[in-house]
Image: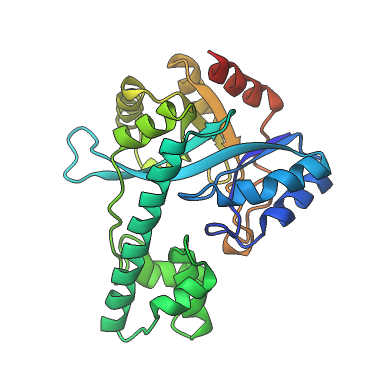
Amino acid sequence: MIDLHIHTTASDGTWTPEQIVTGARSLKLDAIAITDHDTFAGYEEAKPIAAREGVQLVCGIELSTKLQPPGAARPKTVHLLGYFLRPPSPAIMEWVALQQQIRHDRNVELCARLAELNVPVTIDEVRARDKSMAGRPHFAAIMVEKGFATSIQDAFDKYLDEKGAAYVDKHDPSFAEGLRQIREAGGIASLAHPVRLNRHGRDEEDLLRQMVKMGLQAIEAHHSDQPARLRDRYEAMAQHYRLAVTGGSDFHGDNKPGVQLGTGREGNVNVYKKHLERLRALARA
């Protein structure tokens, strides 16, 4: 079994890269990918530990992008997973650093929006949690500690999600740009958790077809938020559009308490090594 979607303390997870590696070893996972948001730092920290512990580690990243669906009034946030079976290029490292600055600018604006709502969270408090990659889960944790929310989910529901009172849109790159950056850097681009596109039937398939035409190479059929019927649907779509299949728990530690490393939510994630072998074949092609 493998897990190709894992977050560490380098972005919005609560387990350190070392804890991820040792946890994977104890679970006897065949391979893992660290896919932190907008950073390779967690992977770089884990690399020597994985070598020491005998854990097969894949370099990954998760990018937030914007895509305009056909007939939609506004762009849709779409997450892309990039997998690098050889080292990512210096060009994407530089581009990722730019995304980190965009993330910081959004955090500053979010602090201002919360202050207007009499929910004081300072940028210094946020940066104390993570100097470069702090995001909304860090805001949520601070808000719970200060008594402005009862839980991480409550903080998102009231303030931080798209319908929350303090929501600030992040100036994400376009889907096409995210795809281009991953592919030009030698990576394989996979659509993350397609269930979150919130599209159904023909609308969902039309959107996937649009992505495939733009250069999408894989789809995350296995994910903690996707029950068996959706897993089967996405695997069928992958076969129809000749996409590779990826999958993982989307593990965040305490920030997603119902999701377990390797197995997802109540054991609903079971990703086999053959999917990683397909990615390796794509990387060699």
Residue sitting nearer the eye, 91 or 70: 91
Which image quadrant is residue 112 in?
bottom left
- Residue 66 placement (x, y as % from top left): 29, 43
Q: How is the image coloured?
A: rainbow
- Give the residue drawn at x 37%, y 72%: 158
Looking at the image, residue 140 lies above or below residue 275: below
- Give the residue drawn at x 56%, y 51%: 41
- Residue 252 placement (x, y as % from top left): 59, 56
Residue sitting nearer the eye, 93 or 227: 93
Looking at the image, residue 165 lies above or below residue 210: below
- Give the residue drawn at x 76%, y 34%: 30
- Residue 118 placement (x, y as % from top left): 31, 86
- Left or right: 165 as drawn, with respect to 271: left
The count of marks equals: 0
Image quadrant holding the N terminus, namely: top right
User: Is residue 228 in view?
Assistant: no
Q: Residue furthest top?
A: 285
Looking at the image, residue 109 lies above or below residue 209: below
- Give the residue drawn at x 47%, y 62%: 132
- Left or right: 259 as drawn, with respect to 103: right
Which image quadrant is residue 117 in?
bottom left
User: Is residue 122 in view?
Assistant: yes
Looking at the image, residue 129 lies above or below residue 63: below
Q: Residue furthest front?
A: 90
- Residue 100 placement (x, y as % from top left): 40, 55
- Left or right: 14 as drawn, with respect to 94: right
